[in-house]
Amino acid sequence: MTPVVVADPAALAEAAARWTAERIGRAVGERDACYLALAGGETPTGCYRRLAQPPYDSQLPWSRVFITWSDERRVPLDDPASNYAMARAALLDHVPVPADQVFPLTEENLPALGRVPKDPAGLPRFDVIHLGMGEDGHTASLFPRNSALKERRAIVRAVDDAPKPPPHRLTLTLPALNAARAVLIMVSGAAKREALARVLRRDLALPASHVQPADGELEFIVDQAAFGR
């Protein structure tokens, strides 16, 4: 894999927002809707803050965007640890996505994933999935050696032993991630340099190495500190 390498977190936010805006526009233009799964974490937050600013806040077809999350911490939605709460503060409170088109990733909302168009295998065909990556190479809430990595049928799995708090989470599975039309992995910071290098050469000991859409695109946008060359 050859990533897009940018100077710093601000440039990463800019590049990720532009990449996302292009694919939202393409999806709505071709299929009249965009099904988008947002990520948690500090690096994606910068992208969402940028999407909440001109020109994206007013020029993107937000009324045709349907939003869920690639993973979520099993905490109240207003908890500071909630990925939903982060995305609401950074993005959703500032753009006109209809409230009934936003589906937090909770047990109660899992039936709402049935609204996402399916591929021939019956998997949800998200137009765009955002992911971050941890220092251990985890992505979404798919951690090294966790049994959720072996899931081949379900599109969402509960994780009750995440090695970083909070331990209880929900995550899209690899089959769901790899059915997407486009996946963006955002990586920032020198602490992730070793893991990123291993993922880019497809070291299968790291969960992020298993993300490879079967019939879609995979993009890494990383900053210079993470890339390190």
Image (tube, grey):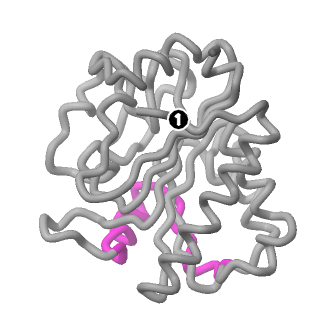
Q: Is residue 73 left or right of residue 155?
A: right
Classify mark 1: residues with Cα within 10 Å, few (<14), some (14-19) or many (20+). Answer: some
* Near-viewer residue (100 or 194): 194
Can you say whether 20 is above or below 171 in the image? below
Is 16 within the magenta?
no
Can you say whether 36 is above or below 197 in the image? below
- x%, y% of residue 21? 64, 67
Q: Which residue is mark 1?
A: 3
Can you say whether 208 is above or below 101 in the image? above
Q: Amino acid at mark 1?
A: Pro
Is 102 within the magenta?
yes
Picture mark count:
1
- Residue 43, by quadrant, is top right
At 63% across and 53% down in the image, what residue appears? 84
Q: Is residue 215 visible?
A: yes
**Screen quadrant of the N terminus:** top left
User: Which structural element holds mark 1?
Assistant: loop
- x%, y% of residue 205? 29, 16
At 48% across and 45% down in the image, what residue appears? 219
* Near-viewer residue (223 or 105): 223
* Near-viewer residue (197 or 80): 197
At 41% across and 23% down in the image, what residue appears? 199
- x%, y% of residue 92? 72, 66
Q: Is residue 89 visible?
A: no
* Near-viewer residue (32 or 101): 32
For the magenta stretch, what is the residue range? 97-116
- Residue 198, by quadrant, is top left
**Screen quadrant of the C terminus:** top right
At 52% across and 76% down in the image, what residue appears? 26
Q: Is residue 15 left or right of residue 208?
A: right
Q: Is residue 21 left or right of residue 118?
A: right
